Image: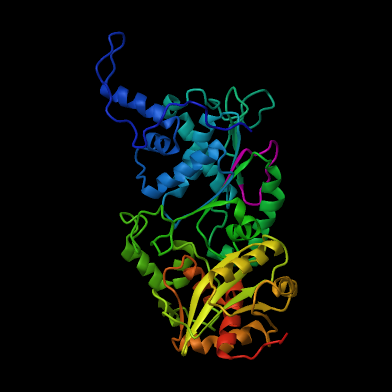
Amino acid sequence: MQDCLDTDSDAIDEDGPGEIDTRPSIERPITLTQAYESIGARYAHRSMRFFTRFVRSHYRMQWYHRQMCDALDEMLKGNIKRLMIFTPPQHGKTEIVSRCFPAFTLGRNPDLMFAGCSHTADLASRFNRDVQRIIDSDIYRRVFPDSQLSSKNVVSNSQGNYLRNSDAFEIVGHRGRYESVGIGGPLTGKTVDIGVIDDPVKDAVESASPVSRARLWEWYTDVFSTRLNNGSRVLLTMTRWHEDDLAGRILAAEGDKWKVLRFRALKEEGDSDEDPRMIGDALWPEKHSKESILDQKARSQRTYDALYQQRPAPSEGGIIKTDWWKLWDRLPEKFDRVLTSWDLTFKDVGTSWVVGQAWGKVGANLYMIDQVRGKWDFPESVRQIKAFRARHPEATETLIEDKANGPAAIATLRNEVSGIIPINPKGDKEARVGAISYHIESGNVYIPARATWKDEFMHECNVFPNGTNDDMVDTMSQAINRLTGSAPQLMML
């Protein structure tokens, strides 16, 4: 598939057209409005953000909409092949991704096969008709005069007519086609060059159903993905409902292949540096104020976390409460004892997390000093253990659970890293976490206030044992058990 964007090297001013020479031409005088429309059409031809503003003059574009548009431009160039965009409800994503983006794409390259998918065939067809209205508009023709639709609705193209109905349409004189599909529906014919899945989940009831989630995953793997090739590009945009939703499953299986834009209703510490807001500011305050979002939080913490902060979670596990944690901004000058702790329980590369943590103890207080986490194979895990220990030379012990990949790592490292301690845990995971939970509840356990992974760590602890992952929890309980003797579990060398 050729890149959708042409190779026109003219630079585009990020702020759009500046001053325009409106002096009338001797050959053909033009009005000020015509001059601005001409320049605007030129910008709209090359940039999603300017195209959206040009064909949707009523659209109130915010800073994060511009970031979305810029990412879509990079997708059309081929620099991004897989893109996820997460936003709270009613924050303007659909106007960009399901209406303007297909029209812009088929204007830039009218020979592409574009698939627009949503949770129902009816909604997908409505998006289809909206895209047709944009392409039919006079203002669109000023930008892309060569991309046109048949003047009549044609149910079948068997007579040589160009197809046009609420399920699909074709670009006159080109190979391009737009096909709208509801989740569960077929995608037949050509390879999909650009595929957009917008809101694949209808509501909370559907998201909570394991059967519905499994059915969606089947459709994605058995229908949608089979229409892709090496050059295909995919956009998944949704509001998160459940940690095991389509986005959650894709990220667990192949997260390293996707670029993710996550826009929270209220900015949190650790969010992207490209987010210009102050901590706690609303994403679109003119439409959804901070007060209204906090009202939603008061009504349902779980809904707030999932739909508004894009951090879906199962119900709380009840063993560790979020408000039990103490935060540190500055570590003690000296520790009584420091160790590192590792969870190496993984099956296949890229499917499970490997976690390493550094912990220190001063009197009755315990401090989580550092953490590393990745989906590494065995050789890389060994390198990470050595590098992490070198980063914390004050540590006298490195704890490695003596199960799964642990014995191999212990055998590899015992002559290279001092203080390797094999751990043979006693009891199940819940019992081990329960045994150390009173240290956290009593306010004796501190975690770093400014760590980028702090919220994810607290979330995993809060939902344990109901969460999808428990690698950070296992590593933590192993360290605290060792430092406090809460549950004797050593297997001596």
Residue 256 vs 171, above or below: the answer is: below
Residue 189 included in the magenta stretch of the image: yes
Q: Is residue 94 left or right of residue 379?
A: left
Q: Which residue is rendered at x = 40% and y = 34% of the image? A: 55
- Coloring applied to the structure: rainbow
Regarding residue 377, the answer to whether it shows in the image is no
Quarter containing the N terminus: top right
Quarter containing the C terminus: bottom right
Q: Nearer the viewer, residue 465 or 307?
A: 465
Residue 282 vs 30, above or below: the answer is: below
* Magenta segment main secondary structure: loop
Residue 40 vs 374, above or below: the answer is: above
Regarding residue 128, the answer to whether it shows in the image is yes
Indicate the position of residue 138 as horizontal and vertical percent values: 41, 27
Q: Which residue is rendered at x = 68% and y = 45% of the image? A: 186
Indicate the position of residue 221 as horizontal and vertical percent values: 69, 52
Residue 77 included in the magenta stretch of the image: no
Q: Outermost residue toward the left?
A: 23
Q: Nearer the viewer, residue 492 or 488?
A: 492
Indicate the position of residue 76 as horizontal and vertical percent values: 54, 37
Q: Nearer the viewer, residue 259 or 399?
A: 399
Q: Nearer the viewer, residue 277 or 329?
A: 329
Q: Is residue 371 left or right of residue 10?
A: right
Indicate the position of residue 65 as horizontal and vertical percent values: 41, 47
Residue 20 vs 376, above or below: the answer is: above
Magenta range is: 182-197
